[in-house]
Image (cartoon, coloured by chain):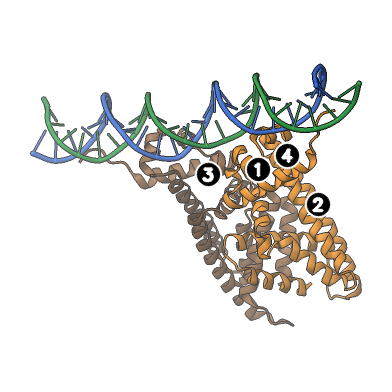
Chain colours: A orange, B brown, C green, D blue
Amino acid sequence: MPRQVDHASRRRLIAEAVCHLADERGLEGVTLRDVAARAQVSMGAVQRCFRTKEEMLVFALGHISERIMERVRARLVRSPAQSAGTALGHAATEISLLREEQRAEARVWLAFVAQATVSKVLATTLKANYAALQEAFTHLISEAARGADRATPLDPQREARTLLALADGLTAHVLIGHLTSQEAHDVLHSHLAAL
Amino acid sequence: MPRQVDHASRRRLIAEAVCHLADERGLEGVTLRDVAARAQVSMGAVQRCFRTKEEMLVFALGHISERIMERVRARLVRSPAQSAGTALGHAATEISLLREEQRAEARVWLAFVAQATVSKVLATTLKANYAALQEAFTHLISEAARGADRATPLDPQREARTLLALADGLTAHVLIGHLTSQEAHDVLHSHLAAL
DNA sequence: CCCGTACCGATGCGCTTGCATCGGAACTGA
DNA sequence: TCAGTTCCGATGCAAGCGCATCGGTACGGG
């Protein structure tokens, strides 16, 4: 058996390169050659890992989805003691990708969302992610609502959808410079407080 | 003076073609040749109207911005009798581009938003539009809030930002198929009711 | 009537793209 | 040590891109 290469890790390496390039120049500016150069591998290696460019992009989307999800999970685990309400706040903040160091991920994410409107495979991947997030949020909200008694009974699923859409909208507005991340934080927490 | 052509209307014609193509294939799939073909003019004509492709795209963005703004304005004028609250609802609905016949505009808009994260000129144009919208919403909200007395005093500007971000997020989620436009409507109106 | 000017369609150029190909390098097992 | 197998880097190719160019066309003024 000759030399074996760890395909999985190489694919991840390449996915990282895709994200960096998508951050800098947009998804359209991602070419196989540039990806190879950025990942410090040859074009042939890239083509061995992914049969087509689209396959590469889909994998990259899955990669960063996983990273984001992982961060949310980590955040929830890190602060388990508090109430479901604060956990919700943390999760929402993570999702919004407002922190400076997440700006790159946010740009890549937005690029993929835009691309998904014309690419069926990307849309499928994205929908799965959103569905998972929405479910998680729904649970958090209904749990948080159990304690607090409210004048009007609230629909956890609808509130989850609201929160998810709001987070995404805020992310986009920060990215194009319409809002500062400060303002976005303010809006987000105000909304959460109203819940 | 030899034959003169109406440059302004031709530019609008081309902008329409750009929007159609961006709707079908994404902003990346917009090429000068295809635009020319779709607009039923020659490539030379396109190049006469716009010196570069970017100039064309920027004009197209301005064109559809204007159209959307115009629709919002028309909607507000059409139903002036009601309260500021219902006017707000109408405006928000228009902005969200949820109706089927606005799906194309929504796709184009999202494509431009994504592109704006890497293009300074596009970002500037977009920011101007969002600023105008936010201001309009702020006024509507503060006006609507004047009548209703509330437990917690609300910040009109913050609520305007929230509404704008929520509308955009919902639009995106409908486009990628995570929500149906029905669900988005539900979310939006529920949020408005909470105000 | 025809000349001059404003317009435009077609064509060419240089470049980049995604993808296919292949000779040789690298490493394992005997 | 060497044969065998797996991998990969370089190169080629056809297509498509944005943009520049230019000769022909059509119209309005003298």
Residue A191 location, x and y as percent? 73, 71
To which residue does mark 2 refer? A131
Foreground: disc 4 or disc 1: 1
Instruction: Indicate the amino acid at tag 4.
Output: Val
Foreground: disc 3 or disc 4: 4
Residue A17 location, x and y as percent? 66, 46
Label 1 sits on a secondary structure element that is loop
Q: Residues within 10 Å of mark 4 (few under 14, many from 20)?
A: few
Residue A143, placed above or below residue C5:
below
Residue B76, placed above or below residue C2:
below
Q: Nearer the viewer, residue B78 or B155?
A: B155
Would you say B58 lies left or right of C19 here? left
- Earlier in the chain: of badge 1 and badge 2, it is 1
To which residue does mark 1 refer? A40
Label 2 sits on a secondary structure element that is helix
Q: Name the residue at 74% across, 53% down.
A: B182
Q: State which quadrant residue B89 falls in.
A: bottom right
Tell me if residue A137 can be seen.
no
- Labelled pair 3, 2 in contact (Cβ < 8 Å): no
Q: Residues within 10 Å of mark 2 (few under 14, many from 20)?
A: some
Q: Are marks 3 and 4 on the same chain?
A: no
Q: How many marks?
A: 4
- Earlier in the chain: of badge 4 and badge 1, it is 1
What is the number of the mark on residue A121?
Answer: 4
- Labelled pair 4, 1 in contact (Cβ < 8 Å): no
Foreground: disc 1 or disc 2: 1
Instruction: Indicate the amino acid at tag 1.
Output: Gln
Would you say B1 lies left or right of B59 here? left
Q: Name the residue at 45% across, 50% down.
A: B59
Residue B83, placed above or below residue B152:
above
- Look at the image and tell me in which quarter the C terminus of chain B lies: bottom right
